[in-house]
Image (cartoon, rainbow, N blue to C red):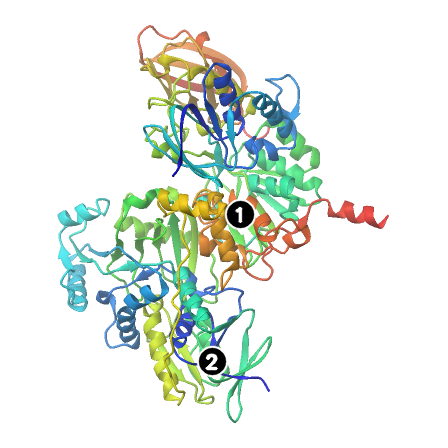
Amino acid sequence: MPRRVKAQVVVIGGGPAGMASALAAFENGARPVFLLERGEYLGGILNQCIHPGFGLHLFGEELTGPEYAERFKEKLSRTQVEVLLNTTVLEITPQRIVRAVNPQGVWEFETTRAVLSMGCRERTRGMLRLPGTRPAGIFTAGLAQYLVNIEGLLPGKEVLILGSGDIGLIMARRLTLEGATVKAVVEVRDSLSGLLRNYVQCLHDFNIPLWLSHTVTTIQGKERVEGVVVSRVDEGGRAIPGSERVVPCDTLLLSVGLIPENELSRQASIPLCPRTGGPVINEYFACEREGFFACGNVVGVFDLVDYVTLVSQGVGEAVNIPTAFSPAKYHLVPGDGVSLVIPQKIQEGKKGFLFLRSLQSFRQAAVSFSFQGKEFHKLRVPLCYPSEMIRLNIQDIPWPSQGGEIRIGITGERIRGIY
Amino acid sequence: MEPVFDVIIVGGGVVGCAVAWYLSHFDLRVVLLEKERDVCCGVSKANTGVIHSRSYFTPHTLKGELHLRSLELFPSLERELDFHCHKVGALTIAFSLHDLQYLNTLKERGKNPHAEIIGPQELKELEPLVNPEVIACYYDPETKVVSPFLLTLALAEFAVLNGVEFIFFTEVLGFEETRDALSVQTNRGVYRARVAINCTGIHATSLAQKTGETIPLHRLYRGQYFVLDRDCQSLVKHVLYPVPTVGSKGILVTPTPEGNILVGPNFELIPEEDTATTKIGLEEVERGGGRLVPSLPLHKTITTFSGIRPTLPDRDFRIFFSLRFPRLLHLCGIESPGLTASLGIAEYVGEQIQKTGILFREKKVAPRVSFPVFRTASWEEREKLIAQDPDWGDIVCRCEEVTLAEIKHALSSCLPASTLDGLKRRVRVMAGRCQGSFCGMHLPDILMGKSLQKREAIMKSGEKSWYCLDTIGRAETENASTR
């Protein structure tokens, strides 16, 4: 017989989002709280991020990933949050029955509140439809990071990195420190995908070239990668014929974006946002299905773990707020220059954070809010990059008295290259 | 002097393994030699995985004859191997009056009372997403799909259970006729047999030429495919065939037994063995698939691959004894529908072997029992499995829900996986939507334990396909120890 458990809160995924929301839910009086993690440890991706840079906003100091995770693990150990490790959730019903397995057996949780904090996964070669042979030596950057930092394995010695996302930049430095040669980081766009500080500290300081407006068009090698064909791309991101060159290497790392992991959300019939790839949520991070919340990268990919923690703590508080699932008044829509808006729905406009990501890099930028075609609010941002989210306090925005669709746009002077 | 086998099978693809399966029913000494480290590494592994029904057989050819014989053998095989084909049915889509004529031909060939030609309205009920420009469609309920690798593995495992020896890393280099046997020379010594069967797929004609045959080398056609995410499963339920073009069955849209959708193959002549995918090839497949299903969600692609079919000019199979070595049987031109016809080929090969005077005495065979699959097990079954062995509760691959128990079994079965690809094809780790980004983290530990030295020896498939190239910090450790 499966182990049947009644819970007030079940948190799915024990990364930074899950840890912070479980902790906050418990601190706000929810009982019992279960935190289900498929891995051997809590902390998720933080465990393999041994570089510093975490916690500047939240703790005012620079921590490594494991140090950051440790602060929450330690706090959790002093609560009665029931942490189940090695426990994989396989099914969530719309009625909030959560079915999981671990080596003890099958578990069935019946919960009042379910918090989705499954995080995200990396885009793969297949999704890029990158043609060529299928040899060993092709890794997503996060997998390579795990192999180096946790398993003690060096994935390759002559490496080309496709995509200038943060994990790719971090791995360029990491592999260089371990004796590998990083031939180049190749980015299809005309500007950086990751954080500027990561470019400076990981590429610039190690003399690793960054080729903007380039992409990998073919993979070569029968058994192990022997080289890749790199081409220049035009404004539309299409490879320019005749610009091909072969870069000999034994390894290709892909740092080409992250996708929120929402297979379980789909099972639970939770409405998803096509822009973010995550559940549609309001300022409480409540989903459009009674009893479900979502936080962290499962909602949309965040740039800083500090922000993930911040919103997840909010979720922990919101599990006890009866009106969290009340109908929304405002529907936020990404306009020109905006790639994503979190949350998509707002009830009152009195609490919480609004996160925006721009589509391109802009100088002298302005974020503009409009209602029924009229701008009602504008704020200036000196510089904005797609890699760095703009975080606003929802209560600082003069929301119109009437409810409806609010369009948010970003304009400014386009920046190309590294700025 | 080396012992004399009754039969040496050269090549462990689906045909070689089917021959092994067939021969293992008789009291014979049989060995199978394979140059790679696993079965099903060549032509057999990369194709559409369709068991084409009799509607699609080619009359007046050997391939057609063996196709039909094979279909007769499948039901008993499924029982004996505890292996099940998925009967999904097929729809052949006609866009013109010319196409419609072809549908009539299929109906005549099929001789199946349940098969019928249906109109656009009925088709829409069966497959709502099919191109609305369709004018008619042939519905054949008998068409099945399989995993080509798992079928090959099941055949091979049955053969092993019933006494056939499988030897890997062994490439056949040549033959020599001795007084009482045929000597088969390999990179790892000489094997002797009363009969040898050349089931080397792509390489069969070059091996035949080496033995003095005048047969032309295979013309190689490459076919490229998209594999779509399992969450597209409900979009296409039947095998969708276009009306064939000259030379091939055309670009199909096929549900796989694992729940993915396969789109392909195109049909391109290539100068030499090359299983790369290309931008042009994939674009052609995209157009072909889009013609059948305009809303095909190719943005849900999880991977692409290509396969090769070795063809002869007359596009038929040729199975014949060597003139110079009368104990050597060549199987050339085994292309589509080689997977479907494999059992028929095996039976036919058996008859040819009997003609050489080797006595076939039936023996009692042990049936094969398939290992449970966690993903398709019910919750009750899962609970029972975990109670038996906690490894069933340890999910290593989250996309395909593969447990440690299944991985351990694949690493220790009678034909164990020895590479990452071998493991992937057996239990589907690394075969899901994340393509190994998650389980790829844990597989080194599972495969080799904690020994760092050995972990560098983990291979994807071939001899030089190292997963990782070194360990971290070894330079420092070595320097420290020499100091």
Q: Identify the residue under disc 2.
A: B29
Front one among A412 and B213? B213
* Residue at 54 percent of width and 29 percent of height: A416
**In the rendered image, which residue does mark 1 sit on?**
A243
Query: What chain is tagged by disc 1?
Result: A
Task: Tell me the mark number nearer the camera, choosing from 2 and 1.
Answer: 2
Q: How crowded is mark 2: few (under 14 residues within 10 Å), some or many (20 or more)?
A: some
> What's the residue type where badge 1 is placed?
Ser
A343 with respect to A220 (left or right): left
User: What kind of element bears circle 1?
Assistant: loop
* Chain of the residue displaying label 2: B
- Residues B87 and A416: in front is B87
B270 or A11, which lies in front? A11
Residue A57 x/y as whole percent:
60, 18
- Compute the Cα span from label 2 to label 1: 59 Å
* Residue A389 at least partly seen: no
- Helix, strand or loop under label 2: loop
What label does residue B251 carry, if any? none
Tell which residue pokes out farthest to the right in this image: B483
Location of the N terminus of chain B by quadrant is: bottom right
Q: Quadrant of residue A182?
A: top right
- Residue sitting nearer the eye, B223 or A367: B223
- Circle count: 2
Q: In this view, does B177 lie above or below B190?
A: below
